[in-house]
Amino acid sequence: MASDSDMSHLGAQSFEQMKQQQKVSKDAKINRYVECVTDAVTKQVPKQAGFDKWEVVVFDSEQVNAFALPGGKIGVYTGLLNVAENQDQLATVIGHEIAHVLADHSNERLSQSQLANTGLQITAVALGSSEYAQYRDATMAALGLGLQYGVILPYGRTQESEADVVGLALIAKAGFDPAQSIDLWQNMAKASNGQQPPELLSTHPSHSTRINDLKQTMARLPASSVQKPNCS
């Protein structure tokens, strides 16, 4: 397993590359909305997690996607806003992605990838270098950014369930409605329209399985003691 500092460095390095390669949204209203939701969720991240400050960037793309990286980096694609119809649904996605970071899931995937057997330090892999292209792809896939390189490395069933539980707890504490998570995943299923499912859905558990699990998780959540955010 890589160290926390190595993972944070890799996350920051990858995020900078994403900002250079992807079109960043200049829409002030959308940026304020996404930042408002993200701020409300990240305020509930335990201090001992080691992330004092989170950076969020909105990418102008029809991708129905979002990601969070070690080091406190979050990316949201404008296409997601067509499916996540309100602040609670957007918070569900952001909370879920943050939960993967808090649970160190990308580190787990990295340790299982081909890069782990090379003897290379992950920070030595020049993400933009053709010399390390195969390792770059594996690294980006482990971070959850593999779609940009045509590589999908799904999280395991246990990791997905853990991210759902932790993510729902985060957004509930932040004052968002966790019940909207069910509507979100129903919207995701509709968005697939029988074709290739949205990026987020393509690497996640089946629709019915996830909804059943979400209902069980919500039944155990304590009531929030904070005021509901008003980001819309």
Image (cartoon, rainbow, N blue to C red):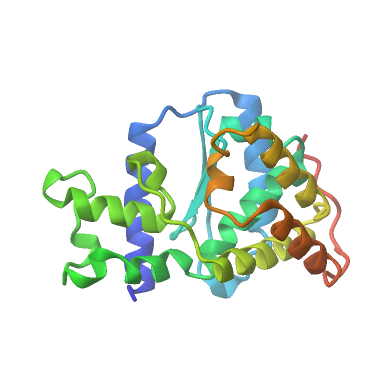
Front residue (pair 202, 35): 202
Q: Which residue lies at the image location 70% right of the left edge and 58% below the top edge?
A: 210
**Residue 56 spot, x, y in % from top left:** 53, 44
In terms of image quadrants, where is residue 108? bottom left
Front residue (pair 60, 159): 159
Q: Is residue 9 above or below residue 64?
A: below
Q: Which residue lies at the image location 69% right of the left edge and 43% below the top edge?
A: 90
Q: Is residue 37 above or below residue 27?
A: below
For the C terminus, which image quadrant? top right
Q: Residue furthest front?
A: 194
**Residue 58 spot, x, y in % from top left:** 53, 35
Q: Is residue 53 left or right of residue 221?
A: left
Q: Is residue 219 left or right of residue 139?
A: right
Q: Which residue lies at the image location 61% right of the left edge and 25% below the top edge?
A: 28
**Residue 83 spot, x, y in % from top left:** 68, 34
**Residue 112 spot, x, y in % from top left:** 34, 70
Q: Which residue lies at the image location 62% right of the left edge and 50% below the top edge?
A: 94
